[in-house]
Image (cartoon, grey):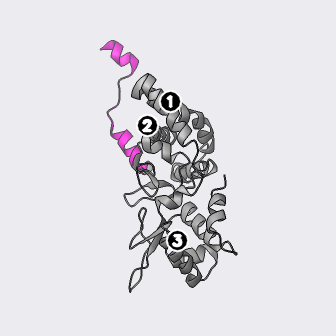
Amino acid sequence: MKFAEPLIDSIETPEGTRARVVRSLLEDGPASAAGLSERLGLTPAGVRRHLDALVADGMAEARDRSPYGPDPRRGRGRPAKIYSLTPEGRESFPQAYDDLASRALRHLALMGGEDAIAEFARAQVAALEERYAAALVGVGPEHQASALAQALTADGYAASAEPSPYGGDQICQHHCPVAHVAAEFPQLCEAETELFARLLGRHVQRLSTIGRGGHVCTTAIPPAQHVHQVESSQPAQPSQSERTSS
């Protein structure tokens, strides 16, 4: 799926540099001007000009620290500003379903209540489960987050996997094709979180979602070693023969 084409039409310079900056912020995450310069092979001064224009247009914002994920190590002196897309910047990219899907789900909720919405959300992710499970076949626990992020990216979520500041990994989905719908119906996000837990075979925790105003959908994944330790600490269940004899 291509994300930047509608945005390119409205903000592209003759060289297309600004569109490349926006796409990098979406797909690769927040960065400093120097970081974007390295990503794109451009001069820091040239990147800053485009970043200043994006900030002035409300498409990007500058912060003293990254809005999510671990902060890059900094040397001495004034810390570099970290740039990320605003909700307005992300909304310039295609959103699937939108008004039609929202109206359909409102009608479903009216006819069947909240349980009907939850059942619909689970059915939606169930259609993806087989494909994502295939992407994890033969993948060791330490690489599962990266493999799942790649599968999500293929479906348009511009996902990445990185070490979590709390231990383990975290999957960051920089784009949500159904963000507008998920803002009204968080059951979609909840069903997706349940799917991740099943695929990875461990409890995961959703830290933020784009639908709820976050800069990114972030899911924390505990270390596989921690999961094994928890499982081994559980008391052994008696066998069927032991239960019968007792």
**First along the sequence among labels 1 and 2:** 1
Q: CA gap, disc 1 to disc 3?
A: 38 Å
Instruction: Mark 3: give few (<14), some (14-19) or many (20+) Cα within 10 Å.
Output: many
Q: Is residue 222 left or right of residue 31?
A: left
Decide which of tag 3 and tag 2 comes sooner along the chain: 3
Secondary element under disc 2, as helix, strand or loop, is: helix
Tell me the residue that label 3 is attached to: 54
Residue lying at the far left of the rendered structure = 246
Q: CB of mark 1 within 8 Å of CB of mark 2? A: yes
In this figure, what is the number of numbered marks?
3
Name of the residue lying farthest toward the bottom: 77
- The secondary structure that most of the magenta stretch takes on is helix
**Up-down relation of residue 2 to residue 235 (above or below):** below
Secondary structure of residue under mark 1: helix
Kind of element beneath mark 3: helix
Q: Identity of the amino acid at label 3?
A: Leu
Which residue is disc 2 drawn over? 187
Q: Is residue 83 magenta?
A: no
Circle 1: is it few (<14), some (14-19), or many (20+) Cα within 10 Å?
some
Say if the magenta span includes residue 240: yes
Residue at x 46% of width, y 37% of height: 191
Q: Position of residue 65 (x, y in %)?
A: 39, 70
- Is label 3 or label 2 in front? 3
**Sequence-earlier tag: 1 or 3:** 3
Q: Of discs 1 and 3, which sits in the foreground?
A: 3
Tell me the magenta residue range.
225-246
The quadrant where residue 110 appears:
top left
Residue 24 at x, y percent in the picture: 58, 66
Q: Kindly identify the residue that appears in the image at 35 percent across and 23 percent down.
A: 238
> From mark 1 to mark 2, how far is it between C-alphas?
9 Å
Kind of residue indicated by mark 1: Phe
